[in-house]
Amino acid sequence: MQKLKWRVILLSFILISAGVIFLYSSSGIYSEMVFGDSFYYLKRQLLFIFLGLIAAIVAYKVDLNKVASHSRGLLFFGLAILLSVLFFGIRAGGAKRWFRLGGFGVQPIEFVRIIYIVYLAAFLERRRYLYKNFSRVCFPVYSITAILMLLLILQPDFGNAIFIALISISLLYFTGIPFKFLFYTLIGIIPFISIAFWKLPYLKLRVLGFLSPWRHSESIGFQLIQSFIAIGSGRLFGHGLGLSRQKLFYLPQAHNDFIFSIVAEELGFLGAFSLLLVYIFLIWNFISILSRIEGLFKRLLLTGLIISFSYQIVINVGVCLGLLPTKGLPLPFISYGGSSMIANMILIGLILNIAKRGGSLSE
């Protein structure tokens, strides 16, 4: 188990270090033009990493049994934060998803997602003998999920609303809930998605930009086309680190949601694939830790954290490759963003905590 923990730390360090390099490469020129300081985003990201390290240490040292016993209170706190951002948050890009603290924006859903996973794990552990009872297990989970999704849609943040639903359904599946319960859930989601598309016109535009980007190359398909150009022009070996052309004000959010496209352009297929391999090795080590953990709460918590971390990577890369509709979800440890960086470092701290306190089977 000790070797697994050190491998998790090493792989996380590699990703964070790579993120610092790619962030400067993708944002330096933009920062110089907009802020007069090519290190503007880099300096802020280094501060986020420092704060994330402190948060990870706290997460590593916290008593998980106490966390489980206070999971309901944590959930109500998370719901209160999501509600308050609707009234006191700042509006950017037509959405209220952030608080302004000093000169920084904080996106609460990044932290509420972890709180929700903690709550789900504790709840499912308490109801472990009732998994075949829909009204005692699935219904309460779906009710809380619906409340979270509603608060997110009001921001609006449909992407994270669907992300929360995916985490709920996935964790229930891995828990062993009868498959028919999950099937009923998928049927029940269809009217919800239909209403969302009716009430939120921007969703239609995102789907149109995803399905037919070349027909809307000057508007809703522009960002995806620029991502295609970046990835395609990188070919096998790329143009070289720092030599991206799409970051020169062609590809919007080049240092954030579409930073993977810049990696592929500068380092080519081999570089982008190597980055994905690091993620795969890290997740494999998460799963190896899971196979050695005793205690249902810790196993469920770790499963939920693995699901959340993995989905972030799949969704971000899928969007850059045009396999999924555009969704503003950062690439863990690589994209610019304080909330994402700190939340993912908390996730790593919790996983190491589980490995430390969860008890292990024979090596």
Image: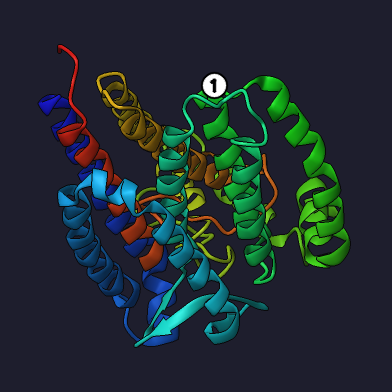
Q: Quadrant of residue 57?
A: bottom left
Write the residue at 63% across / 64% down. 152
**x and y percentages locating residue 76 in the rendered image:** 47, 63
Residue furthest top in the image: 362
The answer to whether residue 111 is left or right of residue 79 is left
Q: Quadrant of residue 155?
A: bottom right
Mark 1, residues whose alpha carbon is within 10 Å: few (<14), some, or many (≥20)?
Answer: few
Q: How many marks?
A: 1
Q: Helix, strand, or loop for circle 1?
A: loop
Residue at x-position 74% and y-position 27%: 183
Of the 4 image quadrants, the one containing the N terminus is: top left
Residue 206 position within the rendered picture, expressed as x and y whole percent measured from the top left: 76, 57
308 left or right, relative to 7: right
Q: Which residue is mark 1?
A: 176
Q: Which amino acid is tagged 1? A: Gly
**Coloring basis for residues:** rainbow
Q: Nearer the viewer, residue 121 or 110?
A: 121
Residue lying furthest left in this view? 2
Q: Nearer the viewer, residue 251 or 80?
A: 80
Q: Residue at x 32, y 64 (%)?
A: 24
Q: Is residue 327 visible?
A: no
Q: Is residue 325 visible?
A: yes
Residue at (47%, 33%) from the top-left corner? 236
Q: Nearer the viewer, residue 156 or 132?
A: 132
- Across and down, in percent, residue 361 comes to 19, 15
